[in-house]
Image (spheres, rainbow, N blue to C red):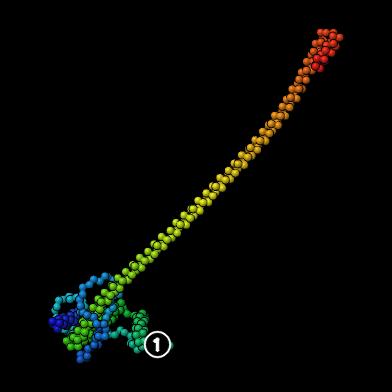
Amino acid sequence: MDAALEQSRLKYLSCKLAEMFLPETAETPPPPIGLEPGTPPKTSNTSGPRVKFVDVPHVITPYSADPPQSSGSILRVVERPLRQGLRCRHPQTLYANMKPYLRWWHSMPSCKVPSQDVSALLQELLKKLDQLELSRETQNYIKLKLQSIVDTTRAVAPSHRRAQGERRLEEVANRQRRRIELMEHQAVDAERMLSLRDSQAFQRLLLNELRQRRRQEVLDRHFCLRHDERLHALAAARKAQEEQIIKGTFDAALEKARQNRIERDNLRREVRQKEIELQNLLISNLENRQEERILFLQDEQNKRQAEMDLQAKSNKVDNLREKIELRQQLTRQIKDLEEALLNQLEPRDLRECNEIRGNYNWSN
C-alpha cells in the first residue's frame, strides 16, 4: 500500500513538472539542482530527535509567527494548486522554439559600448582605490554602473545623437535581448530538470524530500504544542503573579487605611482633649473673673455704704446745727418783734420791768 502511494505521488510530481516546464507557460522555474544522473543521493540527517509519526487531532491557538523563508527545495515547483487537471504531456524542448528569436537577436547590430573601455575604466578606478579590497560582486556592480554612465554620456554627446525612433528601437532591442537571455536560462534549467525527471536519483531525492517534509511537519506540530503549553504556563504564572501583586497591594492598602484610621482617631481624641481642656480653662477663668467682680462689687458696695453712713452722720450733725441756728434765729426774731411791740404800746419803765421779767423768764 505504501509503495503504491509513493508511486502515485511520483507520477503526480512528474506530471506537474512536465506541465510546468512546457513552452506555453511563462513562469520562472526553480533554481537548478546540482545533481547529475548516476550521482549518489544525499543522505538525510537522522541524528535528530526521533518523533513518532502519529496524526493526533489537536487545537492550536493562533499566535504570531515569522513568515516562512524561501528554500531551495525541489518540491517548490509543485506546491502550487493544480490548474489544468491531472494531464501529463510529453515534454518538449523549449530551446527549439527559441531558435528563431536567437537568430533574430544575433542578426541585430550591437549598440553596446565595447567592454574593453569599461574594463579599462574599472582598472584605473581600482588603481586609484588600491587600499580597498573589492569583491567580485562589487566589481561587477561598479562595471555595470560605469557601463550605464558611458552609454548615457555617448547617448547625449552631440556627435552621437540619434532620433527618437532609433532610441526606442534600441530600448526595445535591449528588453528583447534580456528577455531572450532569461528564456535561454529557463530552457537550460527546464532541460536539466526534465532530464532528471525519470532518473532513480531524482525519485530517491523526492522520497527523501517528502520524508523530510513530513518529519518537519510533525516537528512543527510538536513544537507548536510545546509552544502553546509554554504560553499557557507563562499566562498562568503571569496571572498568579498579578493576583499575588494585587493581593499584596490590597493588603497594604487595608493596612494603610487602618493606620490612617488609628492616627485619625488619635488625632481626633487629642483635639477633643485639647478642646475640653480649653473649655475648662475658659470656665475657670470666667468663674475667677466673676468671683473677682463679685468681690469688687461687694467692696464697692461696702465703701458706698460706709460713705453713705458717714454722709448720713454728717448730715445729721449739720441738720442739728442748722436746727439750733434756725431756733436761735427765730428766737432772736421773736424777741425783736416783742421788743418792737413793747416799745410801741407800753412806756419805757414798764418796758424795762418787762425786760427784767422777761430775762428772768428766759433764764428759767
Which of these two is toward me, 123 or 245?
Answer: 245
Which of these two is toward me, 314 or 175?
Answer: 314
Q: Residue at x 76, y 22 (%)?
A: 324
Q: Residue at x 30, y 75 (%)?
A: 66
Residue 95 position, x and y percent, is: 20, 85
Q: From the viewer's perspective, tell me whether residue 332 is left or right of residue 160.
A: right
- Residue at the farthest bottom position: 38
Work out which quarter of the rendered image holds the N terminus and state it. bottom left
Q: Kindly state the secondary structure of the residue where label 1 is placed.
A: loop
Residue 98 position, x and y percent, is: 20, 84
For the residue marked with disc 1, what is the amino acid?
Answer: Glu
Few, some or many residues within 10 Å of mark 1 (<14, 14–19, 20+) = few
Which of these two is toward me, 83 or 59?
Answer: 59
Kindly indicate the quadrant of the structure image that contains residue 298: top right
Work out which quarter of the rendered image holds the C terminus and state it. top right
Residue that badge 1 annotates: 133
